[in-house]
Image (cartoon, grey):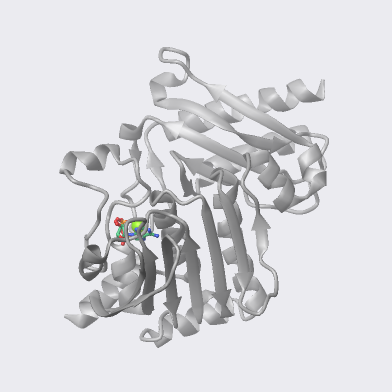
Amino acid sequence: QDVVHKIAAGEVIVSPTNALKELIENSLDAGSSSIQVVCKDGGFKLLQITDNGNGIDDDDLPLLCQRFATSKISAFEDLETVSTLGFRGEALCSISHVAHLSVKTKVSTSSTATVATFGDSKLLSTKKCAGVQGTQVSVEDMFYNIPLRLKALRSKSNSDGAEYQKILDVVTKYAIMYPGTFSCKRVQDSQPFVIPAGPPKEKMKRIFGAGVFKNLLDLNIELADGEPGSEFGLKAVSGCITSLNYPSKKSTPYIFFINKRLVSCDPLSRAIRKVYQDHMPKSSSHAVVFLSIELKSENIDVNVHPTKREVRFLYEDEIVDIISQKITKELTKSSD
Ligand code: ADP
Ligand code: MG
């Protein structure tokens, strides 16, 4: 029984960065406007997320790590129209099976905070302590009980720097998309990297530097019902992309959010890369691209994989085409 749980959990939580994504999404679902991340040893030793969200009521702690325990869905039909990022109730449960999990939390109506520890879905202990409103989730010794997984992951990138880079990468992507303050540090760093609250463009300035910022074009496309493209469920595309005046040597992965979820979409990446290559003949040129795409929710399948990394949606080819045409238009317009 325990082995089954461990295997299932190992499919939901596959790496420190994927756990981090789940925890940031929980903080966002809790209405947080400030999210701080601290990690040790690339997140394997410690991954800690502190938010200023709603907090968790003491009464809810015993069931917090039960499989499929979620406060976010009340009826099956809700699955079609989920407005929260989480809805499966699998993340915390899974983390409790592959790591040591503790949660410190305080709701506004309580005068004290509670620290709770969890193991294999179960609440192990609770203790009252002082604290401010919000939740701090600490994940320690990830995959301590799956030594092969730990070894495989760690041998892929054997420097702490590379692992930390991946963590920082996830934090910065969410920071661009969501208006609140985000910060990230390793335990040994005296100062965190802080991305103050603000619009995406300001955040990109902080993250990518003034050179990128000076060359950013705003993208703001809305498709009204009946407009060409809307028949494929495309509602809006907004974001920032570097103009053709910015032949960057550094390749940064494109940042895509679809209906506010961080996703990867290879067909879209390929199409956008081609747009830039066609217009910037220098083959070494790269671009910085951040897109927030709104699709009709009934056309998306967010349920395709437990880790939700990949998203599937209807009319993928058509939508990728429309978006790359819009980008081409913006780029050529600005270089005239
Ligand atoms: P899901 O997000 O799919 O509901 P999770 O396992 O990620 O499932 O979280 C389980 C539940 O724990 C959530 O539904 C929510 O009620 C609560 N929770 C988790 N993290 C936080 C947080 N940072 N702040 C407030 N509540 C949280
Ligand atoms: Mg969640």
Ligand 2 lies in which image quarter?
Answer: bottom left
For this view, does 281 lie left or right of residue 69? right
Query: Looking at the rendering, in which quadrant would you find the C terminus?
Result: top right
In this view, the residue in front, 331 or 238, is 238
**Residue at left 25%, top 56%?**
70
Q: In the rendering, at what x and y percent does residue 239 appear?
A: 61, 35
Can residue 150 be seen at all in this image of the molecule?
Answer: yes
**Residue at far front of view:** 111
Can residue 273 be seen at all in this image of the molecule?
Answer: no
Q: In the rendering, at what x and y percent does residue 271 appear?
A: 59, 38
For this view, does 163 lie left or right of residue 12? right
In this view, the residue in front, 60 or 294, is 60
Q: Give the number of callouts.
A: 0
In this view, the residue in front, 315 or 105, is 105
Decide: is 85 above or below 98. above
Q: Quadrant of residue 155?
A: bottom right
Q: Quadrant of residue 77?
A: top left
Q: In the rendering, at what x and y percent does residue 148 appear?
A: 42, 85
For this view, does 136 lie left or right of residue 7? right
**Residue at left 63%, top 52%?**
253
Decide: is 280 above or below 53. above
**Residue at left 56%, top 71%?**
38
Query: Looking at the rendering, in which quadrant would you find the N terminus?
Result: bottom left
